[in-house]
Image (cartoon, rainbow, N blue to C red):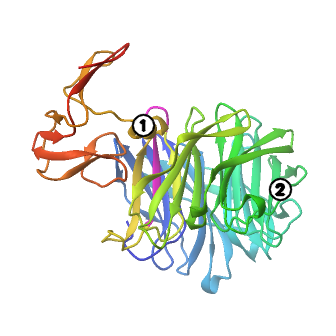
Amino acid sequence: MDTGNNGGPNEVIYLGSNKVFILWKEDGSVLKAQIGTISGSSLSLGTAVTVNSVSTSADNLAAAYVSSTSVIMVWNYGGGNGDKGFARAASISGTTITLGTETNFANNNAVGQPNIVWDASAQRAVVVYRKSSKATYSLLSISGTTLTVEQDLQDVGDGSYIESSILTYDSTAEKTVVMYRDTANDKLKLVCMDVGSSSITQGTQVVRDANRFMGTDKLSATFVPGINKVGYAYILNSNGGDDALTIRVGTVSLSGTTITLNENTALDHDNINDYTYLLMSSDNNGNILITYDDNDSGNPDKLRGLIGTYSGNTFVTSSLADFTIINSLLYAGRFSQCFTDSTNNKFVHFGHQSVGQGQTTQGYVAHVIGGVDDLISFNNWIGLSSQSVSNGASVKVTVQSGLNENQSSLSVGSKYYIQNDGTVGTTLIENRQIGIATAATKLFLTNGTIEIGPTGYNAN
């Protein structure tokens, strides 16, 4: 992928069948799209295609899943093309991407920060953007790879000042939820949209009463199975009023187009002022992974996260909170993230890495991260199995001070860490060192073993 010093926006979307759609901006003015195929903890890439046809700066991209073989992308052109907004559909076969023609929305007006969501009930795409500083939307239909603007230049809610938006489809209520920060008043605003074939009916706008100074890319939302509602999360910095220096998590409950909010604090400490680029994802069981960039200038940057679940409308943070997922990861801009499915049970994380703090190369990088259960297990590991074993059978486990001889191709003298896919490797992951190789097949941990069986464990 691009190796330039470019921290532009990007998207990663799970398509199903071990495939992800990746969209990013290369150095200069080019948008690229590519299909990645997941195999274990690795990602192989198909041929990249150029999305935009005009050789001027293309900015503020976003993409929406339509089906396992179709996506819609949006962006605006800067430079000499007047910040005009464009959309383009793509069909996908294997790792091959076929593009439709570019379609202008907002009637050639200058726009900024476009975002897009697919409303599966209406079979329409909703694009929300900033026009003349106001929150505005357009409605698109798709046939094959042809897009048609069905409704254009409509206010979102009261059409107040918008920085950027978060759009989430509630598949239970069959409604689209729009969230954005009114930067003129530091208020979090929400609107529910009942999307039709050629127009949208909006409910009453909800305004979060307290100051919500969250900044760019510190707000995220996702549909949460289990509670069957839209969940959201955001970072409040030191200007955030009574809830300053916290990560807040909530739910959006819908009755028709009427919104009810519930919200509580998930994380509270002074270092939150160093956190940015928050993302929220849910697995198929409603387990939540919230990730964010820790860019404390006094320490190496890293990707941190917290895990939790909802109990009704209350978010309950697990014991695994504010933990390091990827160490020495120097992000140059916002990143993107998606959950795969219950078969893969993994998250795919994508962003642009800069040189520094141990990183010697720059460019876009993808990380395949274990699912919530795996991440919690990493934090609670007790040792390594001493032999291969079938499910349900007893196995001897090497614990601290033991010498595990069930390894291969180790580098003698190297430190080993539990990797995100559950294997053992030399890539440093904070708080996951497991041992030191004493031979190609031997890893020194600690003393003795315990025997784990279907009914528990017995000291050996």
**Quadrant (top left, top right, bottom left, bottom right) of the C terminus:** top left
Taking the image as shown, residue 356 lies to the left or right of residue 61, namely left
The residue indicated by pointer 2 is 208
Amino acid at the residue labelled 1: Asp
Q: Nearer the viewer, residue 60 or 304?
A: 304
> Label 2 to label 1, Cα distance in Å?
35 Å
* Residue at the (46%, 53%) spot, across then down: 349
Q: Residue at x 76, y 76 (%)?
A: 109
How many residues crowd around disc 1 within 10 Å: few (fewer than 14), some, or many (20 or more)? some
Position of 431 relative to 170 (above/below) = below
Expressed as whole percent of the image width and height from the top left, the position of residue 255 reads 86, 37
Q: Secondary structure at mark 2?
A: loop
Q: Quadrant of the N terminus?
A: bottom left
Does 250 sit left or right of 257 as displayed?
left
Give residue 328's position: percent from left, percent from top: 38, 63
Q: Residue furthest left?
A: 439
182 or 256: which is nearer to us? 182
Q: Nearer the N terminus, badge 2 or badge 1?
A: 2
Tell me if residue 141 can be seen.
Answer: no
CB within 8 Å, label 2 to label 1? no
Q: Which range is magenta?
A: 341-352
Check residue 227 for magenta coloring: no
User: Mark 1 sits on what residue?
Assistant: 374
Report whether 172 appears left or right of 68.
Answer: right
Give the image location of residue 383, x and y in percent.
Answer: 28, 33
- Which of 26 and 315 lies nearest the eye of the viewer? 315
Q: Give the residue type that dot 2 points to.
A: Arg
